[in-house]
Image: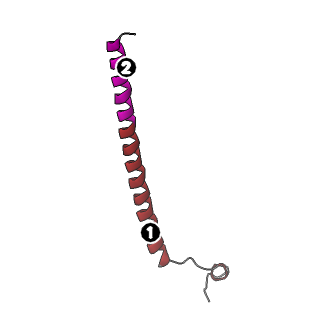
């Protein structure tokens, strides 16, 4: 191959590597953001659920619906 063709191919490889690196960083940012958002949602859900405890099985087992 000619020197010029080799230079063009090398430049294309370098540009491809740059694009892959940029895409990898963007993907990492997206995943990090999604994890933070999921953690925040889970935290809010846990806080909201702490005040609303389900009835125990024995409380809901009374035939007349009365609780003890």
- Overall secondary structure of the magenta section: helix
Precedes in sequence: disc 2 or disc 1: 2
Q: Nearer the viewer, residue 45 or 24?
A: 24
Q: Residue furthest front?
A: 3
Graded by Cα atoms within 10 Å as few (under 14), some (14 to 19) or many (20 or more), the crowding at tag 1 reads few
The picture places residue 34, in percent across and down from the top left corner, at 41, 54
Magenta-colored stretch includes residue 64: no
Which secondary structure, mark 1? helix
- Quadrant of the image containing the N terminus: top left
The picture places residue 56, in percent across and down from the top left corner, at 62, 80
In the image, residue 42 sits, relative to residue 22, either above or below, namely below
Magenta-colored stretch includes residue 7: yes
The residue drawn where x is 43% and y is 50% is 31
The picture places residue 27, in percent across and down from the top left corner, at 40, 44
The residue drawn where x is 48% and y is 73% is 49
Q: What segment is highlighted magenta in the picture?
A: 3-20
């Amino acid at each position: 191959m000619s020197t010029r063709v080799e230079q063009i191919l090398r430049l294309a490889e370098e540009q491809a590597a740059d694009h892959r690196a940029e895409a990898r960083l963007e993907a990492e940012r997206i995943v990090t953001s999604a994890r933070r958002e999921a953690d925040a949602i889970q935290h809010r859900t846990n806080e909201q659920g702490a005040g609303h405890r389900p009835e125990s099985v024995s409380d809901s087992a009374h035939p007349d619906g009365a609780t003890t």
